[in-house]
Amino acid sequence: ALSESHSDARLMQQATLIPALVWAALWGVCGLAVIALTVRRTWAPRPPAR
């Protein structure tokens, strides 16, 4: 469904003149990095309890 609202990528394009596709890709990469770091930290071996 189309609406009059704009995505964050579109708003950043208007503010910086960098294409929305670049902003969308950047947000996607940042999201994947956060997920990867979370999974890595969750699955990391824990030091033995004292």
Image: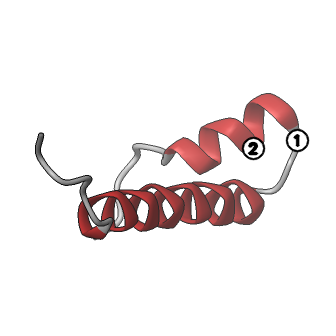
Residue sitting at x 60%, y 64%:
29
Residue sitting at x 84%, y 33%:
16
> In this image, 28 relative to 22: left or right?
left
Give the quadrant of residue 36.
bottom left
Which amino acid type corresponds to the residue marked 1 in the rendered image?
A: Leu
| Residue neighbourhood size for the residue with mark 1, other residues' Cα within 10 Å, grouped as few (<14), some (14–19), many (≥20) | few
Residue in front for this viewpoint, 44 or 26:
44
Q: CA distance from mark 2 to mark 1?
A: 5 Å
> In this image, 20 relative to 7: left or right?
right
Identify the image quadrant of the C terminus: top left
> In this image, 45 relative to 25: left or right?
left
Residue to which mark 2 is pinned: 13
Residues at badges 2 and 1 in contact (C-beta under 8 Å)?
A: yes
User: Residue 6: horizontal and vertical position, in percent?
Assistant: 48, 45
Give the quadrant of residue 23.
bottom right
Residue in front for this viewpoint, 48 or 45:
48
Residue to which mark 1 is pinned: 17
Pick out the residue farthest to the left.
49
Q: Which mark is residue 2?
A: none
Residue in front for this viewpoint, 34 or 1:
34
- Position above or below: 16 against 47: above
Which amino acid type corresponds to the residue marked 2 in the rendered image?
A: Gln
